[in-house]
Image (spheres, helix red, strand yellow):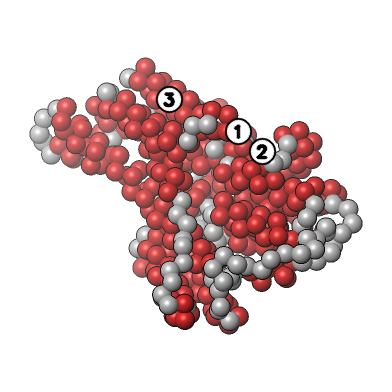
Amino acid sequence: MLITTLFIVALLVFALLVMSTEKINHLNRAAVAMCCGVVVWVVYMLNAGNYIRLVHPEEYSFFLSGTRSSTDSVKFFVAENVMVRYVEEACSVILFLIATNTIVEVLHNNGVFDSLVNWLRMRSSRRFLWIVSLLTFAISANVDNLTTVVLMMGIVAQIVRSHSQRIVYGSAILVSAMLGGCFSVIGDMTSLMLWVRGYVTPTNYYAGLFLPAVTSLCVFNLLISSRLQGRVEVVSHYDRYSGDDSYLPWWQKVLLLIVGIGGLWFIPTFHYITKLPPFLGALCVLALMWMIEGLCNLERNGNVLFVQRHYFRNTEFIGISLCIGALTECGALGWVGSQLEDSFHNIYIYGAMTGVVSSLLDNVPVMMTGMNMFPLVSYTEVPSDFVVDGAYWQLLSYSCAMGGSLFFISTLAGQAVLQVENMKFKWMLMHYSWRVLCAWIAGMLVFWLTH
């Protein structure tokens, strides 16, 4: 059993390394994740009987209902009671992200964000930095980081002509998007997983991470603003939105914005009232958005707007979920968690370790690994950081966000900034990474003071 476990761990580490070096090896990271997700479960099945008796003895005994254990019963138990949990969790998150990303696409395709280009055209470079950062932070609290970064980088490209200024603003956009995503339960795939599993509740999660996130944002902006001198080099001539020429008047655009953003913020309340999965609330908001959008575009003769889909990203997440699931079910993550508790028993050390790892590897599997190392415990008289809304879950999300911001290579949002502005690694180390580290430490200090 030990050899099988080590082989599963080795496969996962190898897959993460290949995914993180996609720009070098040119292998599609989604394909690697899906392949690894299938292979690790095949390896798991070679020793499934021992793993089940180790991790799920009572559940398996109830499943047998007095009958004799066999190879087929083990396989059926794994397929119907073990693996399906991770597939269900992954699908819930993906359906939620599909709905929220499509809401943003509907708003964008109807020109709702076009007015931002005119509003943001200003001369003060440092004022522009703060406004772009706060706007990115607010949008990323509602939509996933990659969508937010692509949207804001597109807006900045229409306003700022200087490449040296754009890379500074791109750095601020990435940090703001990562912090906005970790501050809200619907802001990113990592924080959404905590909510879907029931580890956090939206109100307490917001309250626990708001001050650390804002502190990190302010510290980073104060440090990076020293790179900006004088005025914004504004593009002298720019073309207005011409993607599919929206004829919507301003009040219809405001209506779509209110329904879209307001609906996203209503999703936690929907879940609290109905106890239904969050993705159902997101799909409901999307359906309402599409109906209103259809009424607003009656004069366009039924012309359907193109909505982008993130299929490859979704399949990648399913593969990652399966990989981490196999690692959990073989007992490896539980063993690591118990060893950490015996050695350190300090969540801030765990947070620092998680952040360092997520700066080099994709922060989504790192976040899932951190979630599965320590079980959720029921409330007891003895204080614990691993209860619902415990400090560990919030710190884990914050550390993954800041660690993922430390270098551009470990997140899809960071890779998008690198690709758009073609930043040099030397510039990143000299002018960017140490500022992120300072902001991370400042936010961690505020987290410690408030918890």
Q: Is residue 403 left or right of residue 101?
A: right
- Report which quarter residue 64 is drawn in: top left
- Report the residue marked by disc 3: 11
- Report the residue marked by disc 1: 360
Q: Do the residues under discs 1 and 2 have CB atoms within 8 angstroms?
A: yes
Q: Earlier in the sequence, mark 1 or mark 2?
A: 1
- Report the residue marked by disc 2: 407
Q: Is residue 246 left or right of residue 286?
A: right
Residue 283, percent across and down? 39, 65
Q: Disc 1 residue type? A: Leu
Q: Which residue is drawn at 38% across and 23% down?
A: 5
Work out whether residue 315 can be spotted: yes
Q: In this view, does 249 lie to the left or right of 326?
A: right
Q: Which of marks 3 and 1 is nearer the N terminus?
A: 3
- Nearest the camera: 71 or 109? 109
- In the picture, the disc for residue 146 is none
Query: Circle 1: is it few (<14), some (14-19), or many (20+) Cα within 10 Å?
Result: many
Q: Which residue lies furthest to the top in this view?
A: 3
